[in-house]
Amino acid sequence: MFVSRAAVSRVMSASARSMSTKVAVLGAAGGIGQPLSMLLKLSSAVDELSCYDVRGSPGVAADLSHIPTKASVKGYLGASEGQEEELGKALTGASVVVIPAGVPRKPGMTRDDLFNINAGIVKTLVEGCAEHCPDALIAIISNPVNSTVPIAAEILKAKGVYNPKKLCGVTTLDVIRANTFVGSHLQKDPATIDVPVIGGHAGITILPLFSQVPGFTATDEELEALTVRTQFGGDEVVKAKAGAGSATLSMAYAGFIFAENVVKAMKGEECVQCAFVESSLTDARFFASPCKFGLNGVEEVLPFGQLSAYEKGWFDKMMPDLKAQIQKGIEFAAK
Ligand code: NAI
């Protein structure tokens, strides 16, 4: 079949366009947002980086724009006196939206204590996504993830654009913590370890499956200590920061790994990583488990395999908490 040169160049530019990836970070001037934006600016998988915040984002974007990598960077601000709302511009054309906007924990606070402020922030930002980039994959970092993801789902549903393949809570920090702690326990390079972490992202709803790590051995006491440390690793950072917030640098790294994997998968490099997604694996509507990511986001929610008796004990303990936190999000969105 004869194909004209013009047609070839149309096809090429269409495919080049479809390969071009804009990632938007909402909350880009924050403790997580800044290093996360920097890591995304360094990634060869990202073509365009959009940094949105209610303060400081033009400065962050200008700063990042001097790094000599291919991604173009623009900063956008929320509305304030004399300043128009730029959320729409920040989101238009985005394929992936990462949301670390919100307030972090202080000592003595649980993730659930953040609910009242962060639920409203996530609601507003996801409404923006529904309007300006309804097809984008939304990755939610803002806590409490167990509730903010169900809020986002309900908002997207109400707007008629919900696609469960395109909404994830980011639980990668739990995975990288588990890998680090197991690496140190087994005296192995943590980069060679990949612990599946299932459930949710708060306290006992975080369940690391050490029984599935090849070569893993531990006494009962060691196993208990590793499990509890993974569940409450965030508290170590909150305590050490003594009122100055929660994990930002390790979270930025985790958010980057998650988002870059999503972008690469959308460009044809399938990958498996854990995420908190709509799921039928258990009777909780949302559940974190390994997921296969591809061209369209979450292509498959994978089963999490056999649990040991010890893990089953934690599983039974966590499910009521997880379901209650999901329900809290659903009820907030219905108000
Ligand atoms: P931060 O206070 O340093 O930064 C938050 C940023 O969000 C600020 O720059 C603020 O201006 C911005 N922001 C607030 N309202 C906004 C809105 N409506 N639109 C756009 N931006 C807005 O806080 P940090 O430490 O970066 O934490 C952010 C969130 O991430 C918190 O909810 C925290 O609990 C959560 N987090 C989640 C983790 C996870 O594993 N999923 C781990 C660590 C923190």
Image (cartoon, rainbow, N blue to C red):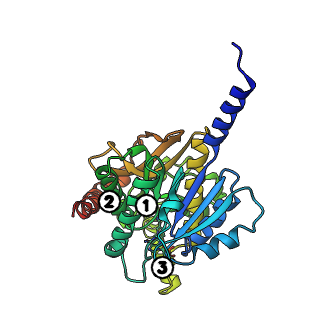
Residue in view at x 48 percent, y 49 percent: 136
Q: Quadrant of the N terminus?
A: top right
Q: Which residue is mark 2?
A: 151
In the displayed structure, would residue 335 be above or below residue 264? below
- Nearer the N terminus, badge 2 or badge 3? 2
Q: Residues within 10 Å of mark 3 (few under 14, many from 20)?
A: many
Question: What is the distance, in whole Å, between disc 1 and disc 3 at their CAs?
Answer: 27 Å
Q: Nearer the viewer, residue 124 or 166?
A: 124
Does residue 325 appear to the left or right of 226 in the view shown? Answer: left
- What secondary structure is found at the residue carrying circle 2? helix
Residue 185 visible in rendering: no
The residue positioned farthest toward the right in the image shown: 68
Q: Estimate the x, y position of residue 26 in percent, counting from the top left.
A: 50, 65
Q: What's the residue type where badge 2 is placed? A: Ile
Alpha-carbon span between mark 2 and mark 3: 25 Å
In front here: 56 or 236? 56
Numbered label attached to residue 130: none
Q: Residue at x 48, y 72 (%)?
A: 84
Check whether the beta carbons of the residues at disc 2 and disc 1 lie within 8 A of each other.
Answer: no
Residue 219 position (above or below residue 163): below
Q: Residue at x 50, y 76 (%)?
A: 83
- Report helix, strand or loop for mark 1: helix
Tell me: is circle 1 under 8 Å from ligand 1: no
User: Is there any visible trace of residue 278 in the rendered image?
Assistant: yes
Task: Residue under label 1, please give it.
Answer: 220
Amino acid carrying label 1: it is Asp
When the figure is inspected, residue 10 is found, relative to residue 175, above or below; the finding is above
At mark 3, the secondary structure is helix
Q: Which mark is residue 238?
A: 3
Image check: 29 left or right of 210? right
Sequence-wise first label, 1 or 3: 1
| Image position, residue 290 (x, y; %) | 47, 46
